[in-house]
């Protein structure tokens, strides 16, 4: 008996997340169908114009907005940013540099610094020989 391989598919929301775009801004045919793994790979390697435009101009989903601003998703929420933003809006926010953004960037820098410290500490502990077990 021969087993048939079925194409692995995903919901449009999952594909949009993997592509780093805001689902509601994608074309209707993308939102209404399913996306196969091969289609996703094709979109990533040779993005159509609509995908290049979305990645360049937005609107961007929260994780992308957070990354572009250098803050966490939680930091965005604390700053009152709940909607997707365009690249232009993100640049305007950077230029304005409100207090909450400065604070969240500083918090994010501390989090990264602490993560690096812990990673270094773990590496040092792994390098030290362990005492033999009784």
Image: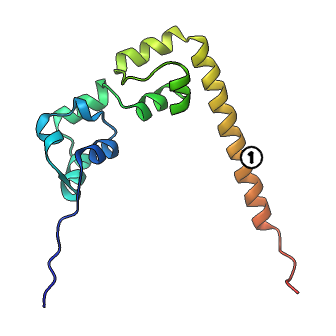
| Residue at the image position 46 percent from the left and 20 percent from the top | 81
Identified at 65% across, 39% down, the residue is: 112
Q: Quadrant of residue 4?
A: bottom left
Return the residue nearer the eye: 94 or 31.
31
Residue at 21%, 41% in the rendered image: 47
Q: Secondary structure at mark 1?
A: helix
Q: Is residue 75 above or below residue 120?
A: above
Q: Relative to residue 129, is residue 105 depicted above or below? A: above
Quadrant position of residue 97: top right
Image quadrant for the C terminus?
bottom right
Query: How many discs mark residues in the rendered view?
Result: 1
From the top left corner, tell me how far across and down residue 66 is, in percent: 48, 30
Residue 68 appears left or right of 130: left
Residue at figure coordinates x 28%, y 42% from the top left: 16
Residue 19: x and y in percent read 31, 43
Give the percent coordinates (x, y) of residue 106.
66, 25
Residue ID for mark 1: 117
Query: Could you tell whether 48 is left or right of 81 in the image?
Result: left
Answer left or right for 82 relative to 7.
right
């Amino acid at each position: 008996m021969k087993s048939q391989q079925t194409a692995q598919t995903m919901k449009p929301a999952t594909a949009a997340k993997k592509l780093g775009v805001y689902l509601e801004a994608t074309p209707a045919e993308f939102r209404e169908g399913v996306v196969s793994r091969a289609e996703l790979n094709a979109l990533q390697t040779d993005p159509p114009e609509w995908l290049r435009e979305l990645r360049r101009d937005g609107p961007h989903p929260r994780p992308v907005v957070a990354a572009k601003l250098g803050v966490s998703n939680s930091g965005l929420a604390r700053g009152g940013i709940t909607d997707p933003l365009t690249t232009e809006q993100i640049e305007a926010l950077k230029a304005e540099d409100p207090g909450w953004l400065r604070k969240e960037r500083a918090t994010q820098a501390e989090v990264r610094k602490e993560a690096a410290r812990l990673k270094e500490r773990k590496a040092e502990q792994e390098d030290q020989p362990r005492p033999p077990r009784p």
